[in-house]
């Protein structure tokens, strides 16, 4: 008993001191530059964050593939192809950085089971046409850009924060491209306008879900404790709403969000989580489900998660691209 107590007394306080001093340093704005400065827990949380971010970039490739094939003009094809190349570049930067932590990028991209890839419902959709593609850019790339801007500004791992400068420069272009063409199609014809609205009806709730569960539900706040992220889920979602709601309102698009005068901020006009109607492929804003039901819905994966990743892994890109 005495020996056991001694062992605990000599092991844990040291770890605690290292943990506490790391947390204090990152809270004070210190940037870590190497793995040696990390505690095991910090390293784990950082790797999880970088891996999910990398997987999200990778998943955009099959998501935009349909839009690449269906782009109406050569200019549009080039614009979609450029975005896909940007996203591959973002993924490559992140997987490359994970190699410094002992991962093999080739294995992560080409050999992992699709079930092991963690992505979000929004980009597990088949963006099958150019109108849906530009709506995705205006809403979805804007959601991703909200997350990566926070990481660039706040992430306490210096090399990762700096690598996101180029990523965010390009994401800003994707969002601007999306917004420009959403406005164009809205004015183009009543048919094009209906298609923009239909794409927004589908994608808006998925983009709002990009930031995860409400803060009140979160049990682990490690990313914030370690300053790997600077903003919470609710704060990121708010920032996204502050940007997309005025844009959509200025165009005239109907969205399930509004400015709440009492609260003094933009809010969703529905109570999360809402039901997905698989039959008519629409959100049922009036039917609330439970969070476990929502988690099960997310876990199933969207329409192109498995087939899209299998397509990447079988390298059927080049020959069938055009
Ligand atoms: Fe990206
Ligand atoms: Fe993007």
Image (spheres, grey):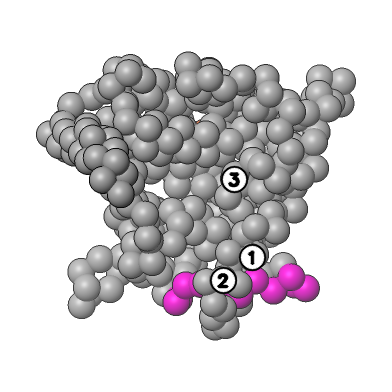
- Asked whether residue 73 appears in the rendered view, the answer is no
On the image, the x and y values in percent for residue 192 come to 65, 55
Distance between the Cα atoms at labels 1 and 2?
Answer: 6 Å
- Mark 3 or mark 2: whose residue is earlier in sequence: 3
Mark 1, Cα crowd under 10 Å, few <14 / some 14-19 / many 20+, is few
On the image, the x and y values in percent for residue 220 come to 37, 54
Check the image and report above or below for 173 versus 213.
above
Q: 239 or 250: nearer the eye?
A: 239
Q: How would you classify the magenta stretch by its main secondary structure?
A: loop
Query: Residue at the spot x=68%, y=23% of the render?
Result: 107
State yes or no: discs 1 and 2 in contact (Cβ < 8 Å). yes
The answer to which image quadrant residue 225 occupies is top left
- Mark 1 or mark 3: whose residue is earlier in sequence: 3
Mark 2, Cα crowd under 10 Å, few <14 / some 14-19 / many 20+, is few
Is residue 8 covered in magenta?
no
Residue where numbered disc 3 is placed: 119
Magenta residues?
A: 270-280
Residue where numbered disc 1 is placed: 296
Query: Residue at the spot x=38%, y=66% of the render?
Result: 217
Distance between the Cα atoms at labels 3 and 2?
Answer: 18 Å
The single residue placed furthest to the left in the displayed view is 28
């Amino acid at each position: 008993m005495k020996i056991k107590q001694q062992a605990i007394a000599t092991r844990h306080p040291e770890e605690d001191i290292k943990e506490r001093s790391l947390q204090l340093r990152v809270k004070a704005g210190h940037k870590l530059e190497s793995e040696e400065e990390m505690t095991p827990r910090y390293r784990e949380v950082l790797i999880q964050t970088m891996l999910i971010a990398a997987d999200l970039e990778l998943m955009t490739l099959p998501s935009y593939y349909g839009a690449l094939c269906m782009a109406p003009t050569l200019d549009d094809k080039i614009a979609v192809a450029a975005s896909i190349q940007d996203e591959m570049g973002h993924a490559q930067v992140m997987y490359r950085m994970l190699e410094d932590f002992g991962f093999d990028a080739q294995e992560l991209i080409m050999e992992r089971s699709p079930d092991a890839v963690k992505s979000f419902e929004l980009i597990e959709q088949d963006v099958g046409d150019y109108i849906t593609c530009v709506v995705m850019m205006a809403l979805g790339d804007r959601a991703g850009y909200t997350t990566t801007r926070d990481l660039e500004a706040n992430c306490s791992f210096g090399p990762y924060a700096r690598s996101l400068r180029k990523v965010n420069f390009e994401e800003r272009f994707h969002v601007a491209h999306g917004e420009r063409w959403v406005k164009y199609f809205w004015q183009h014809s009543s048919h094009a306008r209906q298609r923009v609205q239909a794409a927004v009806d589908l994608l808006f709730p998925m983009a709002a879900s990009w930031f995860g569960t409400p803060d009140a539900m979160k049990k682990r706040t490690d990313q914030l404790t370690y300053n790997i992220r600077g903003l919470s889920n609710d704060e990121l979602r708010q920032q996204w709403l502050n940007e997309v709601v005025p844009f959509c309102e200025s165009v005239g698009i109907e969205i399930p969000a509004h400015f709440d005068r009492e609260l003094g901020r933009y809010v969703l006009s529905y109570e999360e989580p809402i039901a997905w109607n698989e039959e008519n492929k629409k959100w049922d804003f009036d039917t609330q489900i439970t969070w476990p039901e929502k988690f099960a819905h997310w876990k199933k994966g969207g329409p192109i998660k498995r087939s899209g990743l299998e397509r990447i892994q079988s390298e059927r890109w080049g020959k069938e691209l055009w």
